[in-house]
Image (cartoon, rainbow, N blue to C red):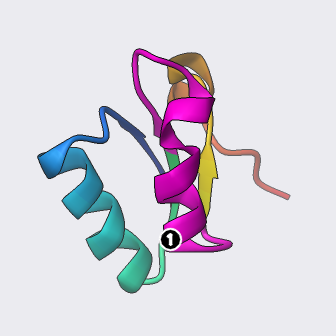
Amino acid sequence: MRIGIVGTGNIGGTLARLLVRAGHEVVLANSRGPEAVAGLAAELGERATASTAAGAAEPPTWS
């Protein structure tokens, strides 16, 4: 499942880590832009992407 998380502080960051560990894909965003969450996305690996808040809110594309 693809899950968008807006806000990557203590709660959002912990939630992202747990979701990735559980096998989900996360799209991370905060008010400062994608470059501010790029470090967390890199830490979480290929299942995490840094984006804007609008990008995190987009529904997934099913193929």
Q: Relative to 61, is 22 on the left or the right? A: left
The x, y position of residue 3, in whole percent, is 45, 51
Q: Determine the residue positioned at 60% across, 74% down.
A: 45
Q: Amino acid at mark 1?
A: Leu
Q: Determine the residue positioned at 23% across, 59% down.
A: 15
Q: Determine the residue positioned at 61% across, 70% down.
A: 47
The image quadrant where one finds the C terminus is bottom right
* Relative vertical location of residue 10 with respect to residue 22 in this rendering, above or below: above
The x, y position of residue 43, in whole percent, is 51, 69
Whether 35 is among the magenta residues is yes
Q: Relative to 3, is 27 on the left or the right? A: right
Q: Looking at this view, name the residue that lies furthest to the right.
A: 63
The span shown in magenta is 28-47
* Relative vertical location of residue 56 with respect to residue 42 in this rendering, above or below: above
Residue position for label 1: 44
Given residues 63 and 33, the one toward you in this image is 33
SS of the residue at dot 1? helix
Q: Looking at this view, name the residue that lies furthest to the left.
A: 11
Q: Which of the 4 image quarters holds residue 16?
A: bottom left
The x, y position of residue 36, in whole percent, is 50, 33
Whether 9 is among the magenta residues is no
